[in-house]
Image (cartoon, rainbow, N blue to C red):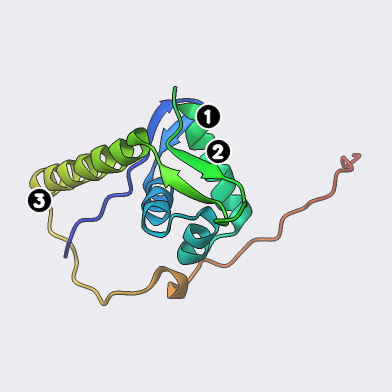
């Protein structure tokens, strides 16, 4: 079984980089469009815009630049920083995965691959959502 890591790097409380933002940057690079990148990743345009906005605000320079409409229809392009973030994040995850495979040599139980959405869930407990406090 292959080891999989989900790595998020927090540079500050307002600035982080993880698999979702990196995938968005890669999709922007492929498509040249924020809306096409959002569609490719199955997310709303608003969600993609918020992720990109948080990246651009979190670093000293933007990771991607957006152009609005016009005769060529606008678009998005990665800056040198955006390309660097992708390359450094992917290299970091690859190195961390190799380290995890070396360090964690414990035997893992053999099992059938089960998609996360089809895994059985624990029964939910009822939650009292009342804002009124109980009086004794």
Residue 105's tag is 3
Left or right of residue 81: residue 109:
left
Q: Which of marks 1 and 3 is in front?
A: 1
Q: Name the residue under label 1.
A: 57
Instruction: For marks 1 and 3, give the CA distance.
Output: 40 Å
Q: Residue 53 carries which label?
A: 2
For image coordinates 46% across by 71% down, the residue present is 117
| The image quarter in which residue 134 lies | top right
Marks 1 and 3 in Cβ contact (< 8 Å): no
Q: Which residue is drawn at 19% across and 66% down?
A: 109
| Residue found 24% across the figure and 74% down from its top | 111
Disc 2: CA contacts within 10 A as few (<14), some (14-19) or many (>=20) = some
N-terminal-most mark, 1 or 3: 1
Q: What element carries label 2?
A: helix
Looking at the rendered structure, the secondary structure element under dot 1 is helix
Which quadrant: the N terminus?
Answer: bottom left
Q: Where is residue 98 in the image (x, y as percent from the top left)?
A: 12, 47
- Give the image location of residue 23, x and y in percent: 38, 53
Earlier-in-chain disc, 2 versus 3 = 2
Q: Which of 82 and 92 is in front in this view?
A: 82
The image quadrant of residue 17 is: top left
| Vertical side of 27 occupied by 79: above or below | above
Badge 3 density bin: few <14, some 14–19, many ≥20, Cα 10 Å: few
Give how far apart the Cα atoms at labels 2 and 1 are.
6 Å
Q: Position of residue 125 (x, y in %)?
A: 65, 61
- Residue 10 lies, with reference to residue 103, above or below; the image says above
Residue placed farthest to the front in the image? 71
Do residues under tags 2 and 1 come within 8 Å of each other at their CB atoms? yes
- Helix, strand or loop for disc 3: loop
């Amino acid at each position: 079984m292959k080891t999989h890591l989900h790595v998020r790097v927090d540079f500050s409380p307002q600035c982080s980089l993880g698999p979702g933002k990196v995938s968005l940057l890669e999709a922007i690079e492929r498509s040249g469009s924020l809306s096409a990148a959002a569609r490719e990743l199955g997310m709303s345009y608003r969600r993609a815009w918020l992720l990109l906005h948080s990246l651009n605000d979190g670093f000293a320079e933007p990771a991607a630049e957006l152009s609005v409409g016009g005769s060529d229809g606008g678009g998005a392009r990665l800056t040198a920083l955006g390309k660097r973030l992708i390359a450094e994040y992917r290299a970091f995850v690859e190195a961390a995965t190799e380290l995890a495979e070396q360090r964690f040599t414990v035997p893992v139980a053999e099992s059938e691959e089960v998609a996360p959405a089809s895994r059985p869930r624990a029964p939910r407990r009822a939650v009292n959502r009342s804002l009124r406090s109980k009086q004794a």
